[in-house]
Amino acid sequence: MTHELLTRLHALEGVPSALASARDGIDAVLRDRGLRRTDPAATAESLLRGAHASAVLEGSASSLDEVREGEADEVAAAAVRLSTQLLSLAPVLQRSPLQALARMHTVVAAGAVPQDRLGRPRDAAASELLRTVATMVTADAPALLVAAVIHGELVSAEPFASHNGLVARAAERLVLVARGVDEKSLVVPEAGHLALRPAYEGSARVLREGGQAAVHRWLLYAAEAYAAAAEASPLRD
């Protein structure tokens, strides 16, 4: 069922070409600067920029400099905390997606929600949604499509008690790593969403209302965001 759903979504008008173009842009940025020789500091910088951008989308007022200096507000501090552990979850995402998603929420929401709610779905419907998302991680479908759909599902259904936006955007980045699009996590998808914030928030709002038209709009938007993510990479500095 998951494969059929993703195949149907990928066949929507304009989606294959938009995602292929976005993937070409990502590949070009990584290839042009010699990915294999990239300093690990570039990965750290990408993760930091991503944490800041995701936090701003979640309501943080902290600047990138404040985040860099360890003077972030609570939301940004949570995003940074998650970013520092994110790449270690790539192999977990591949073999046990539900465990990886639960761990992401546990890390980001620690101290903000009761201990017994950390990493746990809000209700039975949220639990079912997470199981569906888990089956998408290794589905035979284009990686950018999978990342966009997983992000959309998590940000629209809000399966956890809190911090769903931070988890959704972190999961998207992690899928790009685990699926081999960006193994060293050098593009910054969160910054792509922040650069296109009105479109991001509008598409997410429509997605919550449901329907194929909303998903179609989200996927076309996601392709634009991935192009912006490539431009936001530290490799472009």
Image (cartoon, rainbow, N blue to C red):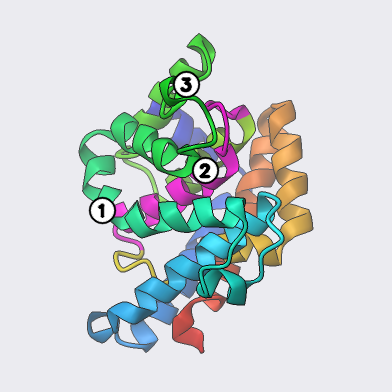
Rendered residue at 60%/77% (across/down): 65
Which secondary structure, mark 3?
loop
Q: Give the answer, above or below, for where 131 lies relative to 53.
A: above
The amino acid type, in three-letter code, at marker 2 is: Ala
Q: Residue at x 75, y 38 (%)?
A: 205
The vertical placement of 124 against 208, above or below, is above
Q: Which residue is mark 3?
A: 121
Q: Tell which circle, 1 or 2, labels the residue nearer the N-terminal end.
A: 1
Residues under numbered marks 1 and 2 in contact, where contact means CB atoms less than 8 Å apart: no
Which disc, if any, is residue 42?
none
Q: Is residue 145 visible?
A: yes
Q: Is residue 225 visible?
A: no
Q: Earlier in the sequence, mark 3 or mark 1?
A: 1
Residue annotated with mark 1: 88
> Which amino acid does the dot numbered 3 rest on?
Pro
- The secondary structure type at the circle numbered 2 is helix
Mark seen at residue 168? 2
The foreground one among 124 and 203 is: 124
Q: Earlier in the sequence, mark 2 or mark 3?
A: 3
Bounds of the magenta segment: 157-181
Q: At numbered mark 1, what does the secondary structure look like: helix, strand or loop?
A: helix
Q: Position of residue 173 (x, y in %)?
A: 43, 55
Provide residue 87's location: percent of width, then percent of height. Answer: 30, 57
Please state which amino acid type lies under the numbered disc 1.
Ser
Q: Is residue 180 magenta?
A: yes
Mostly what secondary structure, the magenta segment? helix
**Is residue 155 covered in magenta?**
no
